[in-house]
Amino acid sequence: MRAISKLIGGLIVSACFVVAGTAKANVVYSYAGANFVLITDEAGGGTVPGMYATSMSVTGSFTFSSLAANINTLTDVTGTLLSGSVSDGRNTVTVAGALGLLTFSVRTDASANIIEYNVQLSDKVSSSLALNETRAFIQILDFSGIHLDAGTIQQCLEVLSGNCSSVVAVDRGRVNYTTTSGVWTQTNLSPVPVPAALPLFGTALAIMGLLGWHRRRQQAAAASA
Protein backbone atom coordinates (compact mmCIF):
# COMPACT_ATOMS: atom_id res chain seq x y z
CA MET A 1 0.00 0.00 0.00
CA ARG A 2 2.78 2.41 0.92
CA ALA A 3 4.51 1.64 -2.39
CA ILE A 4 1.31 2.52 -4.28
CA SER A 5 1.02 5.80 -2.38
CA LYS A 6 4.58 6.66 -3.29
CA LEU A 7 3.84 5.84 -6.93
CA ILE A 8 0.83 8.17 -6.95
CA GLY A 9 2.85 10.92 -5.31
CA GLY A 10 5.58 10.50 -7.89
CA LEU A 11 3.13 10.70 -10.76
CA ILE A 12 1.54 13.87 -9.40
CA VAL A 13 4.90 15.53 -8.82
CA SER A 14 6.05 14.53 -12.30
CA ALA A 15 2.90 15.92 -13.82
CA CYS A 16 3.38 19.22 -12.04
CA PHE A 17 6.89 19.56 -13.37
CA VAL A 18 6.15 18.51 -16.93
CA VAL A 19 6.21 21.57 -19.12
CA ALA A 20 3.06 21.52 -21.14
CA GLY A 21 3.88 21.00 -24.79
CA THR A 22 3.03 23.99 -26.93
CA ALA A 23 1.79 23.69 -30.47
CA LYS A 24 3.74 25.95 -32.76
CA ALA A 25 1.81 29.15 -33.36
CA ASN A 26 0.22 29.58 -36.75
CA VAL A 27 1.02 32.74 -38.68
CA VAL A 28 -1.39 34.88 -40.70
CA TYR A 29 -0.30 36.89 -43.73
CA SER A 30 -2.74 39.59 -44.83
CA TYR A 31 -2.54 41.31 -48.18
CA ALA A 32 -3.85 44.71 -49.27
CA GLY A 33 -3.44 45.83 -52.86
CA ALA A 34 -4.00 49.21 -54.47
CA ASN A 35 -7.23 50.06 -56.26
CA PHE A 36 -7.59 48.85 -59.82
CA VAL A 37 -6.59 51.27 -62.57
CA LEU A 38 -7.29 49.31 -65.75
CA ILE A 39 -10.84 48.05 -66.22
CA THR A 40 -11.88 45.67 -69.00
CA ASP A 41 -15.53 44.76 -69.50
CA GLU A 42 -17.38 42.70 -72.07
CA ALA A 43 -18.60 44.65 -75.05
CA GLY A 44 -22.26 45.48 -74.63
CA GLY A 45 -22.39 43.99 -71.16
CA GLY A 46 -21.91 40.44 -72.46
CA THR A 47 -23.13 37.42 -70.51
CA VAL A 48 -21.54 38.31 -67.16
CA PRO A 49 -23.50 40.88 -65.13
CA GLY A 50 -21.66 43.68 -63.33
CA MET A 51 -18.19 45.04 -63.86
CA TYR A 52 -15.02 45.90 -62.01
CA ALA A 53 -14.47 49.45 -60.73
CA THR A 54 -11.54 51.63 -59.75
CA SER A 55 -12.78 51.50 -56.15
CA MET A 56 -12.06 47.74 -56.02
CA SER A 57 -8.80 46.00 -55.13
CA VAL A 58 -7.39 42.61 -54.20
CA THR A 59 -7.34 41.86 -50.48
CA GLY A 60 -6.76 38.59 -48.69
CA SER A 61 -5.68 36.71 -45.61
CA PHE A 62 -3.80 33.40 -45.45
CA THR A 63 -3.01 31.20 -42.45
CA PHE A 64 0.15 29.09 -42.48
CA SER A 65 1.33 26.51 -39.99
CA SER A 66 4.74 28.07 -40.56
CA LEU A 67 6.61 30.08 -43.14
CA ALA A 68 10.38 29.92 -43.10
CA ALA A 69 12.64 32.95 -43.05
CA ASN A 70 15.32 33.53 -45.68
CA ILE A 71 13.61 31.73 -48.55
CA ASN A 72 16.03 33.04 -51.12
CA THR A 73 14.34 31.84 -54.31
CA LEU A 74 10.67 31.84 -55.22
CA THR A 75 9.41 28.64 -53.55
CA ASP A 76 6.08 26.83 -53.45
CA VAL A 77 4.73 27.03 -49.87
CA THR A 78 1.33 25.45 -50.38
CA GLY A 79 2.35 22.58 -48.09
CA THR A 80 2.13 24.81 -45.01
CA LEU A 81 -0.93 26.82 -46.08
CA LEU A 82 -3.85 25.89 -43.83
CA SER A 83 -6.59 28.19 -45.07
CA GLY A 84 -7.21 31.52 -46.69
CA SER A 85 -9.55 33.84 -48.48
CA VAL A 86 -8.97 36.45 -51.18
CA SER A 87 -11.34 38.96 -52.76
CA ASP A 88 -11.13 41.18 -55.84
CA GLY A 89 -14.21 43.25 -54.98
CA ARG A 90 -16.56 41.10 -57.04
CA ASN A 91 -15.61 37.56 -56.17
CA THR A 92 -14.19 35.82 -53.12
CA VAL A 93 -12.14 32.65 -53.41
CA THR A 94 -11.80 30.58 -50.25
CA VAL A 95 -8.81 28.31 -49.84
CA ALA A 96 -9.02 25.10 -47.84
CA GLY A 97 -5.96 22.95 -48.44
CA ALA A 98 -5.51 22.73 -52.20
CA LEU A 99 -9.10 23.77 -52.92
CA GLY A 100 -9.17 27.11 -54.71
CA LEU A 101 -5.40 27.32 -54.86
CA LEU A 102 -3.47 27.28 -58.13
CA THR A 103 -0.11 28.74 -57.11
CA PHE A 104 1.35 30.17 -53.91
CA SER A 105 5.09 30.79 -54.16
CA VAL A 106 7.06 33.31 -52.12
CA ARG A 107 10.47 34.63 -51.22
CA THR A 108 11.01 35.81 -47.63
CA ASP A 109 13.52 37.91 -45.69
CA ALA A 110 15.25 37.21 -42.36
CA SER A 111 12.03 38.04 -40.47
CA ALA A 112 9.89 35.78 -42.68
CA ASN A 113 8.27 38.79 -44.34
CA ILE A 114 7.05 38.09 -47.87
CA ILE A 115 9.13 40.14 -50.31
CA GLU A 116 8.36 38.42 -53.62
CA TYR A 117 5.34 36.35 -54.53
CA ASN A 118 3.29 34.63 -57.18
CA VAL A 119 -0.21 33.86 -55.94
CA GLN A 120 -2.98 32.64 -58.25
CA LEU A 121 -6.37 31.42 -57.09
CA SER A 122 -9.62 30.36 -58.68
CA ASP A 123 -12.96 29.01 -57.53
CA LYS A 124 -13.01 26.39 -60.32
CA VAL A 125 -10.59 24.29 -62.34
CA SER A 126 -10.53 25.61 -65.90
CA SER A 127 -10.69 22.17 -67.54
CA SER A 128 -13.92 21.35 -65.67
CA LEU A 129 -15.83 24.33 -67.05
CA ALA A 130 -18.78 23.75 -69.33
CA LEU A 131 -19.17 25.77 -72.51
CA ASN A 132 -19.75 29.46 -71.64
CA GLU A 133 -19.37 28.73 -67.92
CA THR A 134 -17.36 31.32 -65.99
CA ARG A 135 -14.92 31.23 -63.12
CA ALA A 136 -13.22 33.77 -60.86
CA PHE A 137 -9.45 34.04 -61.28
CA ILE A 138 -7.45 36.27 -58.93
CA GLN A 139 -3.70 36.83 -59.05
CA ILE A 140 -1.13 38.93 -57.24
CA LEU A 141 2.39 38.91 -58.64
CA ASP A 142 5.64 40.58 -57.69
CA PHE A 143 8.69 38.81 -59.10
CA SER A 144 11.09 38.95 -62.04
CA GLY A 145 10.01 42.45 -62.97
CA ILE A 146 6.29 41.61 -62.95
CA HIS A 147 4.26 43.71 -60.50
CA LEU A 148 0.48 43.46 -60.70
CA ASP A 149 -2.82 42.62 -59.05
CA ALA A 150 -5.72 41.39 -61.14
CA GLY A 151 -9.25 40.22 -60.60
CA THR A 152 -10.64 38.38 -63.61
CA ILE A 153 -13.76 36.59 -64.70
CA GLN A 154 -12.87 33.96 -67.27
CA GLN A 155 -15.26 32.17 -69.58
CA CYS A 156 -14.93 28.84 -71.37
CA LEU A 157 -15.11 29.29 -75.14
CA GLU A 158 -14.47 25.74 -76.32
CA VAL A 159 -14.91 22.22 -74.99
CA LEU A 160 -13.07 19.26 -76.47
CA SER A 161 -13.46 15.65 -75.30
CA GLY A 162 -15.46 16.81 -72.30
CA ASN A 163 -12.87 19.32 -71.09
CA CYS A 164 -12.76 23.06 -71.51
CA SER A 165 -9.81 23.71 -73.79
CA SER A 166 -9.99 27.49 -74.13
CA VAL A 167 -10.76 30.23 -71.59
CA VAL A 168 -10.76 33.96 -72.11
CA ALA A 169 -10.93 36.92 -69.72
CA VAL A 170 -14.29 38.63 -70.22
CA ASP A 171 -14.09 41.06 -67.28
CA ARG A 172 -10.95 42.29 -65.54
CA GLY A 173 -9.81 44.79 -62.99
CA ARG A 174 -6.06 45.33 -62.86
CA VAL A 175 -3.38 47.51 -61.36
CA ASN A 176 0.23 47.50 -62.57
CA TYR A 177 2.76 48.63 -59.99
CA THR A 178 5.82 50.60 -60.99
CA THR A 179 7.88 51.10 -57.82
CA THR A 180 5.86 49.61 -54.96
CA SER A 181 3.47 46.69 -54.83
CA GLY A 182 0.71 45.60 -52.48
CA VAL A 183 1.40 45.34 -48.76
CA TRP A 184 1.79 42.12 -46.77
CA THR A 185 1.43 42.16 -42.98
CA GLN A 186 2.39 39.28 -40.73
CA THR A 187 0.56 38.31 -37.52
CA ASN A 188 1.68 35.48 -35.26
CA LEU A 189 -1.27 33.80 -33.55
CA SER A 190 -1.08 32.90 -29.86
CA PRO A 191 0.13 29.32 -29.41
CA VAL A 192 -2.39 26.80 -28.16
CA PRO A 193 -1.09 24.97 -25.03
CA VAL A 194 -1.14 21.21 -25.26
CA PRO A 195 -1.55 19.68 -21.75
CA ALA A 196 1.24 17.13 -21.96
CA ALA A 197 0.89 16.40 -18.22
CA LEU A 198 -2.79 15.43 -18.55
CA PRO A 199 -2.14 11.69 -19.09
CA LEU A 200 -0.03 11.62 -15.91
CA PHE A 201 -2.79 13.29 -13.90
CA GLY A 202 -5.32 10.84 -15.34
CA THR A 203 -3.16 7.86 -14.39
CA ALA A 204 -2.67 9.20 -10.88
CA LEU A 205 -6.41 9.76 -10.39
CA ALA A 206 -7.20 6.27 -11.68
CA ILE A 207 -4.75 4.70 -9.22
CA MET A 208 -6.13 6.83 -6.39
CA GLY A 209 -9.63 5.61 -7.21
CA LEU A 210 -8.46 2.00 -7.23
CA LEU A 211 -6.60 2.53 -3.97
CA GLY A 212 -9.70 4.01 -2.32
CA TRP A 213 -11.81 1.09 -3.46
CA HIS A 214 -9.23 -1.37 -2.15
CA ARG A 215 -9.10 0.42 1.24
CA ARG A 216 -12.89 0.42 1.61
CA ARG A 217 -12.98 -3.26 0.78
CA GLN A 218 -10.39 -4.01 3.46
CA GLN A 219 -12.29 -1.94 6.01
CA ALA A 220 -15.53 -3.75 5.21
CA ALA A 221 -13.80 -7.13 5.54
CA ALA A 222 -12.29 -6.13 8.90
CA ALA A 223 -15.69 -4.92 10.22
CA SER A 224 -17.42 -8.21 9.35
CA ALA A 225 -14.66 -10.36 10.90
Image (spheres, helix red, strand yellow):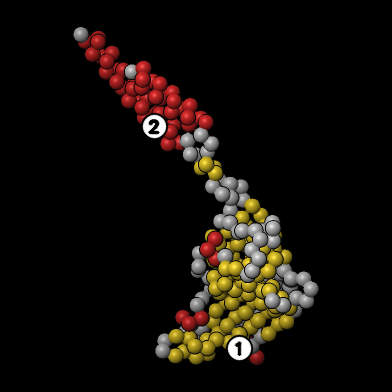
Amino acid type assigned to the residue bearing label 1 in the image: Gly
Q: Which residue is mark 2?
A: 203
Residue pictured at 77% horizontal, 71% vertical: 180
Q: Which residue is mark 1?
A: 46
Depth check: give the residue in front, 104 or 76.
76
* Residue 59 percent coordinates (x, y): 67, 67
In the rendered structure, the answer to whether residue 115 lies left or right of residue 162 reads right
Depth check: give the residue in front, 138 or 133.
138
Q: Count how many numbered circles sit on residues in the image.
A: 2
Which quadrant, please, contains the C terminus?
A: top left
Residue pictured at 27% horizontal, 18% vertical: 217
Q: Secondary structure at mark 2?
A: helix
Q: Secondary structure at mark 1?
A: loop
* Residue 120 percent coordinates (x, y): 59, 73
Amino acid type assigned to the residue bearing label 2 in the image: Thr
| Residue 8 in which image quadrant | top left
Say if residue 158 shows up in the picture: yes
| Residue 119 in which image quadrant | bottom right
- Quote the CA–CA distance across marks 1 and 2: 69 Å
Residue pictured at 36% horizontal, 27% vertical: 207
* Residue 65 percent coordinates (x, y): 56, 56
